[in-house]
Image: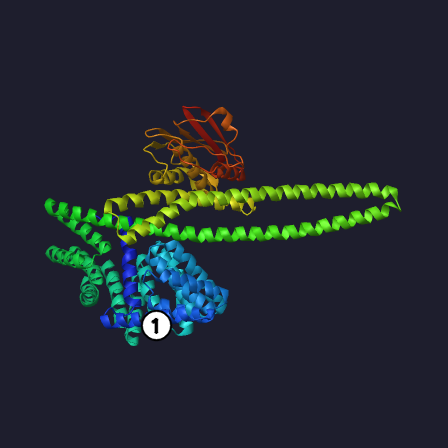
Amino acid sequence: MLQSLNPKETKFSKFFIIISFLLLSGTQSSNAFQLEEHEVKADSLYRLYKNSKSELRKLDLLSALVTEIHYSDSALQYYQEAIKLARQYDRKELLAQNLNRLGVYFRNMNLQEEALILYEEALEVSKSLNTPTQIGHSLNNIGQMYYLKEFYEEALEYYLEAEKEFLKANDLSGLGYNYTGMSLVLSELGMFREALDKVDRAIEIREGLGLSRQVIVSKFNKADILMSIGIYDEAEEHIQRLFQYGLENDKVRAIHALEKLVELKIKTGKFEDAIKYAETAEVLHKQKPNSEAMIDIYQQMNQMHFTRGDTTRSAKYQSLLQAERNIIKNERTKNHLAGITIKNQREEIAFLNRQQQLIEENARIKIYLSIVLFIIILLVSIGFFIIFRAWKREKVNLHNLSIHKDQIEEQAHQLQRSNTEKDKIFSIIAHDLRSPLNSLTGLLNLVQEKSLTKKEFTSYVEMISKNLGNNNTLLENLLLWSRSQMKKLEPKPTSFNLNELIQKNLDLLPYSGYFKGQVIINSVNSDFFVLADKNMIDIVIRNLLSNALKFTRSEDQIVVTATSWYSKVRVTIRDSGTGIKPEDIDKLFKADFYSTLGTNQETGTGIGLMLCKEIIEMHQGKIWVESEYGLWSDFFFEIPKAN
């Protein structure tokens, strides 16, 4: 029996196949005339937008512009401006529309979490407008994201809700998308009869609307379902139609069809036909690269030849398979970095908005203090007037005045401390966050000037990637710490496996800017479960491990262990690094932003350990350190054990 695909590769391939067919069914034809027509429309809309003096007019033009350049890289900035204007002028219909479209943009970049956030907001806006068609598209999009995450039952619920909305609006086009997507979910749940019924209804609707390209997509989905239940002849007819369409219009689609034809021929024992289709796919792949589909083809051919005892051909396809996997890996890295940049930008904007709110709150406090001071002065004046009438009441008034004065001084002291901490945070942002962003800008300028060699480009990307990764941790610490200072940080305990969380963080350490070749060991038992806020404990472990990397050298050991008794679990992170001076131990975990340089002169902010202490104490635990200077350091923390 042929070995199945690696689950991660299967999921990744499924994602790109779905996106490819969404592009096929949702965009204009790729012939030269239609492309030229889109370019002319986009150019005209852009000129009108740049010359418009009305913000509302700009919003309408932007919404029309992104429709024409929906899948281009330049669309992102226009989506963001359109959404900003729609919020500003309360144009909810355009807000929902552009949120959904920006979600599609992020989905195509494999930024699924970002896309899901936008779809959910679009759903809320659409519900407030009570527009069934827009609600249906939002529900459809959310269902698709759950399908990509392999949460099939949840995906089906959203598709069924979307179906109700499209039926309510009598939106046949929306029903075509809905039934096509729902058929894939039903197939994954083993409900093949229902899946075939839905896809047949989608085909009937699309044929009635004259949407020939979309009919081909629905029939391709039907072929996939038919193959799952062993009806190969009818499945092959539908796949061949997509193949012919791809040859005429888009070779990427043709390669996807060939992938299915190779699978079909292997399942039916027609190995020579499978070989011919694979060879045809290789030819098309050279003309129009499509690594996602070729990975599946090479995997199937490798296993087929291995099963038949042809080790030479099996080795050939294994080599080709590895090359395509490397291409996909690089693409994932690129998308991951793009996702981090987008996420950091959004979180930085949110953080600065919160800072602005704090500044405004401080201004209001100053006004209140001025009023209080005015009242106090008034009271003092009245008191001096009353002195002439009652000597005893003078003492009472003076006592009250003293109390108010102490309160004002305490408030002024707290305000001064808040301003000092704020200045420290801005200093950290200016120093630690600006440098790698400037490096990234410099790299982009060099790329535009085409003055970099491939080797230099690779080295710069690796350096900037590490710096951005470190800054992502710093930004998360700053945001979480600011939430704790505003008393808005509350743990949400759940039961989770401690070993898995620690291992996840250890797997990421080699990509940290502090990694120098240290030996990292996870000695935590796989059956340790704790009751805590998983995201908060993740941040504690990440900060303590980063701290251990910072103060260790190449080939030093970092060992994570855990012990359990009664209702507590104690985690120990030991490193054989530089150790801590006795006089410096008491400075750790305090709100003074204390930090020292690492073994490679790495800088820090002191926020990490301070944040760890606050998080652990929120869980009714404790955290401490033991060390021998020059030899080792042990960081301990205790959290509740799950029952």
Q: Could you tell me residue 392's position as x and y percent?
A: 86, 41
Residue 586 drawn at (x, y percent): 52, 29
Vertical side of 607 occupied by 235: above or below? below
Pointer 1 residue: 44
Q: Which quarter of the figure has residue 142?
A: bottom left
Q: Residue at x 44, y 24 (%)?
A: 629
Residue at x-position 46% and y-position 65% = 85
Q: Is residue 497 left or right of residue 380?
A: left
Residue 359 in percent (x, y) is at 57, 51
Answer yes or no: is residue 4 visible.
no
Type of amino acid at the residue the image marks with label 1: Ser
Nearest to the observer: residue 550 or residue 625:
550
Characterize the local packing of mark 1: few (<14), some (14-19) or many (20 or more) Cα atoms within 10 angstroms. Answer: few
Residue 297 in sight? yes
Q: Which is more toward the observer, 326 or 446?
A: 446
- Looking at the image, residue 224 lies above or below residue 208: above
| The one of 592 and 515 positioned closer to us in this rendering | 592
Judging depth in this view, the residue of 356 and 575 nearest the camera is: 356
**Relative image position of residue 295 (x, y in whole percent):** 21, 52
User: Is residue 327 shown left or right of residue 99?
Assistant: left
Q: Residue furthest right?
A: 389
Judged from the image, the secondary structure of the residue bearing numbered disc 1 is: helix
Number of residue marks? 1
Image height of 367 relative to 428, above or below: below
Colour scheme in the image? rainbow
